[in-house]
Image (cartoon, grey):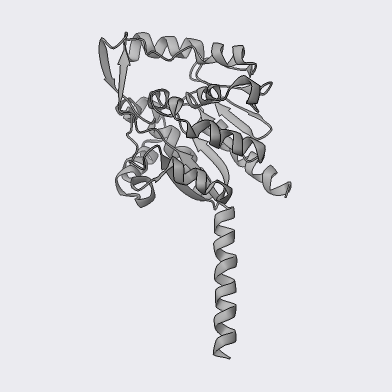
């Protein structure tokens, strides 16, 4: 009897583990903390934009999904100091306080796995989210693991969310093997890039003009006015425009997750 009970418990544990894995979303984060401007003549602190990280994390977690964080070398991500400004948290100052506590206290955020490990475990994740921020233009945009992950999630038609600057990572996949050619896509707009460079950073980074480069690659770029709450969903791909687009992104990404479940 004891042996039968043990077998049943082991089976139940296996089922529970499998279910947990099937509801896990991979968040890939940059760890870059310094941005060179004006051909290296000026340095500026950078990192992941806090609300572009925390708002989708909160919504996805509240929907019952697990989240695993990954960075290039398993080092905790840096948060862009600019993103702590209240102007990015209109009517959400309580949530901003939650977010600041989260990055200090959350064990998973502060102990990310490596991108190599994420690739080894890629079958365990049903979705991918990459928050924005200038930091990813420095490290993720040149990391050989990013196109591997993007192509895997595209091939498996798993929901892939790229926020603000993160759609630029589609450019890491050569055109001849890029699964997103012809997709509708959104990202930080040309005018928003101009405003960021002229009035916030007061300098030009090396990697820019994301929208133009996406169009040139063969994607159908869509945008709305600066600071719009805007995102685009095309099949498994969800992209959003700026730090003010959290509500639009979350709605479409959860829709993509639901469609993925219904297709199984």
Query: In x, y percent, where is residue 226?
Result: 50, 15
Most extreme residue toward the right, as rendered?
263
99 left or right, relative to 177: left
Nearer-the-camera pick, 206 or 258: 206
Residue at image coords 55%, 58%: 20
Residue 194's place in the image compared with 106, above or below, is above
Query: In x, y percent, where is residue 113?
Result: 40, 46
Query: In x, y percent, where is residue 216?
Result: 60, 11
Residue 141's place in the image compared with 117, above or below, is above
Q: Quarter of the image holding residue 177?
A: top right
Q: Quarter of the image holding residue 181?
A: top right
Figure quadrant of the N terminus: bottom right
Most extreme residue toward the bottom, as rendered?
1
73 left or right, relative to 228: left
Residue at image coords 29%, 45%: 104
Q: Quarter of the image holding residue 34?
A: top left
Nearer-the-camera pick, 40 or 186: 40
- Is residue 158 visible in the rendered image? The answer is yes
- Looking at the rendered structure, the number of numbered marks drawn on it comes to 0
- Is residue 58 visible in the rendered image? The answer is no
Nearer-the-camera pick, 80 or 226: 80
Query: In x, y percent, where is residue 124?
Result: 56, 51
């Amino acid at each position: 009897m004891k042996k039968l009970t043990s077998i049943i418990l082991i089976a139940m544990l296996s089922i529970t583990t499998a279910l947990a894995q099937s509801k896990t979303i991979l968040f890939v984060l940059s760890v870059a903390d310094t941005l060179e401007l004006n051909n290296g003549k000026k340095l500026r602190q950078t990192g992941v934009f806090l609300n572009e990280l925390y708002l989708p994390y909160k919504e996805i977690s509240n929907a019952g999904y697990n989240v695993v964080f990954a960075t290039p070398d398993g080092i905790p991500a840096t948060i862009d100091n600019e993103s702590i400004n209240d102007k990015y948290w209109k009517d959400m100052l309580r949530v901003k306080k939650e977010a600041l506590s989260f990055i200090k206290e959350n064990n998973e955020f502060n102990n990310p796995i490596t991108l190599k490990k994420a690739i080894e475990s890629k079958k365990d994740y049903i979705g991918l989210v990459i928050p924005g921020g200038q930091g990813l233009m420095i490290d993720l945009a040149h990391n050989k693991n990013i196109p591997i992950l993007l192509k895997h999630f595209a091939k498996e038609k798993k929901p892939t969310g790229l926020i603000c600057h993160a759609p630029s990572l589609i450019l890491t996949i050569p055109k001849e093997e890029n699964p997103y050619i012809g997709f509708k896509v959104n990202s930080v707009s040309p005018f928003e890039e101009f405003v960021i460079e002229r009035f916030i950073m007061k300098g030009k980074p090396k990697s820019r003009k994301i929208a133009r480069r996406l169009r040139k690659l063969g994607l159908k770029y869509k945008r709305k006015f600066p600071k719009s709450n805007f995102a685009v969903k095309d099949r498994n791909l969800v992209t959003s425009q700026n730090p003010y687009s959290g509500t639009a992104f979350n709605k479409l990404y959860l829709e993509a997750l639901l469609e993925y479940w219904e297709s199984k």
